[in-house]
Amino acid sequence: MKMQATESNIERPREEPSRRLAGAWTAGFAALAFLSFVVPAGRNLAGADAPEHDAEITALERRVDRLEVGLDRVTDAYESEVRPIEDLLRYYSEDDTLVRRIALALVRESEAVNVDARLLTSVLLVENPWLDPSALSSVGAVGLMQVMPFHAGGWGCIGSDLTDLDVNICHGAKVFENALRLAEGNLDRALLRYNGCVRGTTTPDCHLYPSKVYAAAGKAIVRGWQASTASEGERGLRRASE
């Protein structure tokens, strides 16, 4: 992608929109951290005075119940939002850690800009199907979403290193959301703008960019069906063996 938007036509987004998914993950991680120290090793609650002991146990149970709710939110968010994106990306990389990090970033940033994560994923797969965070194009576009360097640090993202996975996807999502706003919601025009094809003079055949993204989306849907079927089969085998 060759994003040629100038500073004059860039509308800066709000700095930090609320992030529902990020809140769920934060709650889950807080739960795990809490459980690691809530009852210090070697402490003998049974030896405490009975009323004190009962009150402490009751308070502990209530806190654990609240933490379990947080963990359930994490599980639900992962299964419904993150895992489907992971299933798509695994066709492009065998690095499970990389795939999970990219999927989490795509879901998080899609919620921040109110753009479907599957659409951002399709753009990413057209820009960088190798899932190489350090990829550099012939015109200088960088990273997973091939962001031009002049965008670095200007979109309220944490950091300006476009080779950083999370920073790059944050910038790419904000740039795309801005393109969609400037195109007044017209997806074809937004995709062309993201690709730097406003006038059609930057890249040969750049007018084909929207169809490439739609093709990537269609392929992703089919592969998502395959992954879903495979997952159901695995769960069935596990149930049969229990």
Image (cartoon, grey):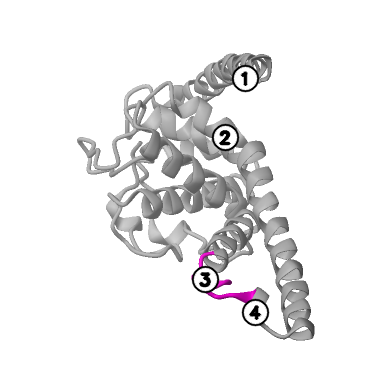
Other residues around mark 1 within 10 Å, as few (<14) / some (14–19) / many (≥20): few
User: Which of the 4 quarters of the picture holds residue 224?
Assistant: top right
Q: Which amino acid lies under the numbered mark 1 shown in the image of this protein?
A: Arg
Q: Which amino acid lies under the numbered mark 4 shown in the image of this protein?
A: Gly
Instruction: Point out the tag, 4 or 1, that comes first from the N-terminus.
Output: 4
Measure the C-alpha gap from mark 2 to mark 1. 19 Å
Q: Which amino acid lies under the numbered mark 2 shown in the image of this protein?
A: Arg
Measure the C-alpha gap from mark 3 to mark 2. 30 Å
Measure the C-alpha gap from mark 4 to mark 1. 43 Å
Tag 3–tag 2 contact (CB < 8 Å)? no
Left or right of 105, for residue 137: left
Residue lying furthest front: 47
Write the start and end of the magenta stretch as one range: 36-45
Q: Residue at x 59, y 53 (%)?
A: 113
Closer to us: mark 4 or mark 3? Answer: 4
Question: For the residue labelled by badge 1, is the local secondary structure a helix, a strand or a loop?
Answer: helix
Q: Residue at x 67, y 14 (%)?
A: 240
Q: Is residue 127 above or below residue 219?
A: below
Say which residue label 4 marks: 47
Q: Return the x and y of residue 21 as percentages of the image width and height.
A: 62, 53
Measure the C-alpha gap from mark 4 to mark 2. 46 Å
Say which residue label 1 marks: 238
Query: Which dot marks residue 37?
Result: 3
Q: Which amino acid lies under the numbered mark 3 shown in the image of this protein?
A: Phe
